[in-house]
Image (cartoon, rainbow, N blue to C red):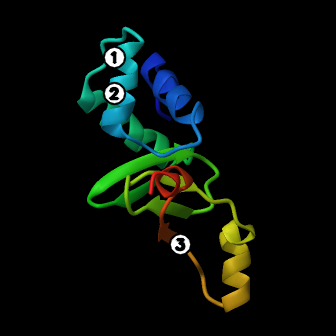
Amino acid sequence: MQRWTSQLSLILGIVYETEHFLSAEKIHHTLMHKDTNIGIATVYRNLRKLVGQGLISEVSWKNVNYYTKHPFSNAFFVCEKCDKMLRIDIPLADQTYLSNEIGMSVKKWRMMFEGICKECESCT
């Protein structure tokens, strides 16, 4: 059993305070604004713990890992202009349902939509 630390609590709180995906660097930047003295290596280590415990979800995009609150349907939208990532909640989020529908054991799945977000669309 892993020890629950104040650092884990702070990082988990930051992830759960937003609807957007956050990189470890963005989480570290937010921690620095909260006057904490948590290093980037500690952020990465605690993010791995939180993912391992199923408390947050992780998505990789352009060789960067991003984190979001759990449960996460594993469907997301990426803006082709600003690279913003948004969660998309769709009814196929249950891996058990998917496994039953296709007759195979689904361990992980990911669905990505690409396009232009509202903000970038309005700027053109």
The percent coordinates of residue 16 (x first, y second) are: 59, 34
Q: Residues within 10 Å of mark 2 (few under 14, many from 20)?
A: many
Question: Of helix, strand and loop, which one carries label 3?
Answer: loop
Q: Nearer the viewer, mark 1 or mark 3?
A: 1
Work out which quarter of the rendered image holds the C terminus and state it.
bottom left
Q: Of all residues shown, which one is farthest toward the bottom?
A: 103
| 93 up-or-down from 87: above or below | below
Q: Which mark is residue 28?
A: 2
x, y percent for residue 82: 38, 52
- Mark 2 and mark 1 in contact (Cβ < 8 Å)? yes
Q: In front: 92, or 53?
A: 92
Residue 83, position as x, y percentages in the image: 38, 54
| Label 1 CA crowd tier, 10 Å (few <14, some 14–19, many 20+) | few
Please tell me whether residue 36 is drawn above or below residue 116 in the rendered image. above
The residue at which mark 1 appears reads as 32
Q: Which label is found at residue 109?
A: 3
